[in-house]
Amino acid sequence: MEKTCNKCGETKPLSEFYKHKNAKDGHQSTCKVCQCISKGNWYRANTGRAAASSKAWTKANPERMADLQRTWKEANLDREAARKKAWRKAHPDRAAATNRHWRQANRDYLRAATRAWSEANPDRIASTRLQREYGISLVEYDKMLRAQTNRCAICGKTPAEEGRRLAVDHDHETDKLRGVLCGNCNRGLGLFMHDPELLQRAIAYLEKWAELEAEAKKSADVG
Protein backbone atom coordinates (compact mmCIF):
# COMPACT_ATOMS: atom_id res chain seq x y z
CA MET A 1 0.00 0.00 0.00
CA GLU A 2 1.03 3.58 -0.68
CA LYS A 3 0.12 6.99 0.63
CA THR A 4 0.58 10.59 -0.50
CA CYS A 5 2.37 12.91 1.92
CA ASN A 6 0.40 16.08 2.71
CA LYS A 7 3.67 18.10 2.88
CA CYS A 8 5.79 17.14 -0.11
CA GLY A 9 2.97 15.64 -2.19
CA GLU A 10 4.96 12.52 -3.01
CA THR A 11 3.36 9.08 -3.00
CA LYS A 12 5.35 6.66 -0.90
CA PRO A 13 5.01 3.19 0.68
CA LEU A 14 3.30 3.09 4.08
CA SER A 15 6.66 2.10 5.61
CA GLU A 16 7.78 5.71 4.94
CA PHE A 17 5.06 7.01 7.32
CA TYR A 18 5.01 6.70 11.10
CA LYS A 19 2.16 4.68 12.53
CA HIS A 20 -0.79 6.46 14.14
CA LYS A 21 -3.56 4.51 15.83
CA ASN A 22 -6.26 7.15 15.12
CA ALA A 23 -5.57 7.40 11.37
CA LYS A 24 -7.85 5.51 8.99
CA ASP A 25 -5.00 3.53 7.45
CA GLY A 26 -3.05 3.43 10.71
CA HIS A 27 -0.32 5.87 9.55
CA GLN A 28 0.29 9.59 9.83
CA SER A 29 -0.41 11.82 6.85
CA THR A 30 3.09 13.36 6.78
CA CYS A 31 6.01 11.21 5.66
CA LYS A 32 9.01 10.55 7.87
CA VAL A 33 11.35 12.74 5.81
CA CYS A 34 9.05 15.76 5.99
CA GLN A 35 8.53 15.26 9.71
CA CYS A 36 12.29 15.18 10.29
CA ILE A 37 12.70 18.38 8.27
CA SER A 38 9.86 20.05 10.15
CA LYS A 39 11.23 19.03 13.54
CA GLY A 40 14.72 20.16 12.56
CA ASN A 41 13.40 23.59 11.55
CA TRP A 42 11.48 23.88 14.81
CA TYR A 43 14.50 22.94 16.93
CA ARG A 44 16.71 25.45 15.13
CA ALA A 45 14.11 28.18 15.67
CA ASN A 46 13.50 27.21 19.31
CA THR A 47 16.85 25.98 20.62
CA GLY A 48 16.26 27.35 24.13
CA ARG A 49 12.82 25.75 24.50
CA ALA A 50 14.05 22.49 22.97
CA ALA A 51 17.03 22.30 25.31
CA ALA A 52 14.90 23.08 28.36
CA SER A 53 12.27 20.54 27.36
CA SER A 54 14.89 17.87 26.72
CA LYS A 55 16.62 18.58 30.05
CA ALA A 56 13.31 18.41 31.94
CA TRP A 57 12.34 15.11 30.27
CA THR A 58 15.77 13.60 30.98
CA LYS A 59 15.53 14.61 34.63
CA ALA A 60 12.02 13.16 34.93
CA ASN A 61 12.87 9.91 33.12
CA PRO A 62 16.43 8.89 34.13
CA GLU A 63 15.87 5.16 33.61
CA ARG A 64 14.32 5.56 30.17
CA MET A 65 17.09 7.95 29.18
CA ALA A 66 19.73 5.47 30.34
CA ASP A 67 18.05 2.72 28.31
CA LEU A 68 17.92 4.92 25.22
CA GLN A 69 21.59 5.86 25.55
CA ARG A 70 22.60 2.23 26.10
CA THR A 71 20.56 1.07 23.10
CA TRP A 72 22.07 3.78 20.89
CA LYS A 73 25.63 3.00 21.99
CA GLU A 74 25.15 -0.73 21.36
CA ALA A 75 23.81 0.02 17.87
CA ASN A 76 26.55 2.55 17.08
CA LEU A 77 29.72 1.07 18.62
CA ASP A 78 32.02 2.44 15.90
CA ARG A 79 30.54 5.96 16.09
CA GLU A 80 30.72 5.94 19.89
CA ALA A 81 34.34 4.76 19.86
CA ALA A 82 35.26 7.44 17.32
CA ARG A 83 33.49 10.10 19.38
CA LYS A 84 35.34 9.12 22.55
CA LYS A 85 38.67 9.00 20.72
CA ALA A 86 38.11 12.46 19.24
CA TRP A 87 37.10 13.86 22.64
CA ARG A 88 40.19 12.42 24.35
CA LYS A 89 42.40 13.85 21.63
CA ALA A 90 40.79 17.28 21.95
CA HIS A 91 40.83 17.25 25.77
CA PRO A 92 43.94 15.28 26.88
CA ASP A 93 44.14 16.86 30.34
CA ARG A 94 40.45 16.28 31.11
CA ALA A 95 40.64 12.74 29.71
CA ALA A 96 43.65 11.96 31.93
CA ALA A 97 41.91 13.42 34.97
CA THR A 98 38.73 11.46 34.25
CA ASN A 99 40.68 8.25 33.78
CA ARG A 100 42.64 8.84 36.98
CA HIS A 101 39.48 9.59 38.96
CA TRP A 102 37.76 6.45 37.62
CA ARG A 103 40.74 4.26 38.51
CA GLN A 104 40.88 5.66 42.03
CA ALA A 105 37.15 5.04 42.49
CA ASN A 106 37.32 1.49 41.09
CA ARG A 107 40.54 0.07 42.53
CA ASP A 108 38.99 -3.17 43.76
CA TYR A 109 37.29 -3.76 40.42
CA LEU A 110 40.55 -3.10 38.53
CA ARG A 111 42.53 -5.44 40.78
CA ALA A 112 39.97 -8.22 40.33
CA ALA A 113 39.77 -7.66 36.56
CA THR A 114 43.56 -7.61 36.20
CA ARG A 115 43.92 -10.78 38.28
CA ALA A 116 41.20 -12.57 36.30
CA TRP A 117 42.77 -11.55 32.98
CA SER A 118 46.24 -12.63 34.11
CA GLU A 119 44.94 -16.03 35.24
CA ALA A 120 43.13 -16.47 31.92
CA ASN A 121 46.12 -15.38 29.79
CA PRO A 122 49.33 -16.75 31.37
CA ASP A 123 51.06 -17.27 28.02
CA ARG A 124 50.47 -13.65 26.95
CA ILE A 125 51.80 -12.40 30.29
CA ALA A 126 54.88 -14.60 29.97
CA SER A 127 55.45 -13.62 26.34
CA THR A 128 55.29 -9.90 27.14
CA ARG A 129 57.68 -10.23 30.09
CA LEU A 130 60.17 -12.37 28.14
CA GLN A 131 60.17 -9.92 25.24
CA ARG A 132 60.56 -6.92 27.54
CA GLU A 133 63.26 -8.33 29.81
CA TYR A 134 65.23 -10.67 27.55
CA GLY A 135 64.21 -9.89 23.97
CA ILE A 136 62.94 -13.42 23.25
CA SER A 137 59.54 -14.88 22.45
CA LEU A 138 57.71 -17.61 24.33
CA VAL A 139 58.51 -19.96 21.43
CA GLU A 140 62.24 -19.28 21.87
CA TYR A 141 61.95 -19.80 25.64
CA ASP A 142 60.23 -23.16 25.12
CA LYS A 143 63.00 -24.16 22.70
CA MET A 144 65.65 -23.37 25.36
CA LEU A 145 63.74 -25.40 27.93
CA ARG A 146 63.35 -28.40 25.60
CA ALA A 147 67.12 -28.33 24.96
CA GLN A 148 67.52 -28.92 28.72
CA THR A 149 64.98 -31.79 28.64
CA ASN A 150 62.47 -29.49 30.39
CA ARG A 151 64.55 -29.28 33.55
CA CYS A 152 66.67 -26.77 35.47
CA ALA A 153 70.16 -26.76 33.92
CA ILE A 154 71.75 -27.15 37.39
CA CYS A 155 69.58 -29.18 39.77
CA GLY A 156 67.22 -30.84 37.27
CA LYS A 157 63.99 -29.53 38.82
CA THR A 158 61.02 -29.48 36.41
CA PRO A 159 58.50 -26.63 36.00
CA ALA A 160 55.87 -28.88 37.61
CA GLU A 161 58.10 -29.34 40.66
CA GLU A 162 58.84 -25.63 40.71
CA GLY A 163 55.14 -24.79 40.45
CA ARG A 164 55.75 -22.18 37.76
CA ARG A 165 57.89 -21.45 34.70
CA LEU A 166 61.62 -21.74 35.24
CA ALA A 167 63.65 -18.52 35.22
CA VAL A 168 65.82 -17.27 32.37
CA ASP A 169 69.47 -16.97 33.42
CA HIS A 170 71.68 -14.44 31.64
CA ASP A 171 75.18 -12.98 31.85
CA HIS A 172 74.81 -9.62 33.59
CA GLU A 173 77.87 -8.18 31.81
CA THR A 174 77.10 -9.23 28.24
CA ASP A 175 73.31 -9.78 28.62
CA LYS A 176 73.68 -13.07 26.74
CA LEU A 177 71.25 -15.79 27.74
CA ARG A 178 72.82 -18.85 29.34
CA GLY A 179 69.99 -21.19 30.14
CA VAL A 180 66.87 -21.81 32.19
CA LEU A 181 67.07 -22.35 35.96
CA CYS A 182 64.76 -22.96 38.89
CA GLY A 183 64.27 -20.12 41.35
CA ASN A 184 66.73 -21.43 43.95
CA CYS A 185 69.55 -22.02 41.48
CA ASN A 186 68.97 -18.67 39.81
CA ARG A 187 68.97 -16.83 43.14
CA GLY A 188 72.00 -18.83 44.27
CA LEU A 189 74.06 -17.66 41.32
CA GLY A 190 72.98 -14.11 42.02
CA LEU A 191 73.94 -14.33 45.70
CA PHE A 192 77.39 -15.54 44.64
CA MET A 193 77.52 -12.59 42.20
CA HIS A 194 77.83 -15.01 39.24
CA ASP A 195 81.47 -15.47 40.22
CA PRO A 196 82.86 -18.95 39.39
CA GLU A 197 85.76 -18.48 41.86
CA LEU A 198 83.38 -17.80 44.74
CA LEU A 199 81.30 -20.84 43.79
CA GLN A 200 84.45 -23.01 43.73
CA ARG A 201 85.41 -21.71 47.18
CA ALA A 202 81.92 -22.59 48.40
CA ILE A 203 82.32 -26.11 47.01
CA ALA A 204 85.71 -26.48 48.67
CA TYR A 205 84.23 -25.20 51.93
CA LEU A 206 81.39 -27.71 51.86
CA GLU A 207 83.73 -30.57 50.90
CA LYS A 208 86.10 -29.66 53.74
CA TRP A 209 83.34 -29.73 56.34
CA ALA A 210 81.93 -32.91 54.89
CA GLU A 211 85.35 -34.54 55.38
CA LEU A 212 85.60 -33.25 58.97
CA GLU A 213 82.11 -34.54 59.72
CA ALA A 214 83.01 -37.93 58.27
CA GLU A 215 86.21 -38.10 60.34
CA ALA A 216 84.35 -37.07 63.50
CA LYS A 217 81.73 -39.74 62.87
CA LYS A 218 84.42 -42.34 62.25
CA SER A 219 86.19 -41.44 65.52
CA ALA A 220 82.90 -41.64 67.41
CA ASP A 221 82.19 -45.09 65.96
CA VAL A 222 85.68 -46.35 66.93
CA GLY A 223 85.38 -44.98 70.48
Image (tube, rainbow, N blue to C red):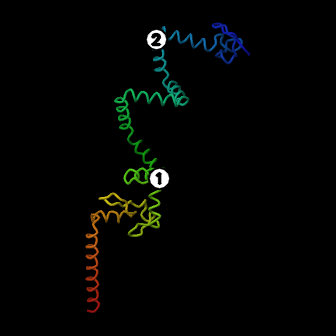
Which image quadrant is residue 199 in? bottom left
Mark 2: amino acid:
Thr
Q: Which residue is mark 2?
A: 47
Q: Nearer the viewer, mark 1 or mark 2?
A: 1
Q: Which mark is residue 39?
A: none
- Height in image: 160 above or below 122? below
- Height in image: 116 above or below 169? above
> In front: 91, or 142?
142
> In front: 23, or 83?
83
**Mark 2 element type:** helix
The residue at 42%/45% (across/down) is 114
Assign the C terminus to one quadrant of the image: bottom left
Assign the N terminus to one quadrant of the image: top right
- Height in image: 204 above or below 4? below
Q: Residue furthest right?
A: 1
Rendered location of residue 58, percent (x, y): 48, 20
Q: Which residue is mark 1?
A: 123
Rendered location of residue 206, percent (x, y): 28, 76
Rendered location of residue 20, percent (x, y): 65, 15
Mark 1: amino acid:
Asp
The residue at 66%/16% (across/down) is 16
> Which numbered disc flags the more N-terminal residue, 1 or 2?
2
Which image quadrant is residue 13 in? top right
Q: In this rendering, would 153 be left or right of 190?
A: right
Q: In this rendering, would 104 be left or right of 120?
A: left
> In front: 19, or 196?
196
Tell me if mark 1 has few (under 14), some (14-19) or many (20+) residues whose alpha carbon lies within 10 angstroms of its own: few
> In front: 185, or 44?
185
**Mark 1 element type:** helix
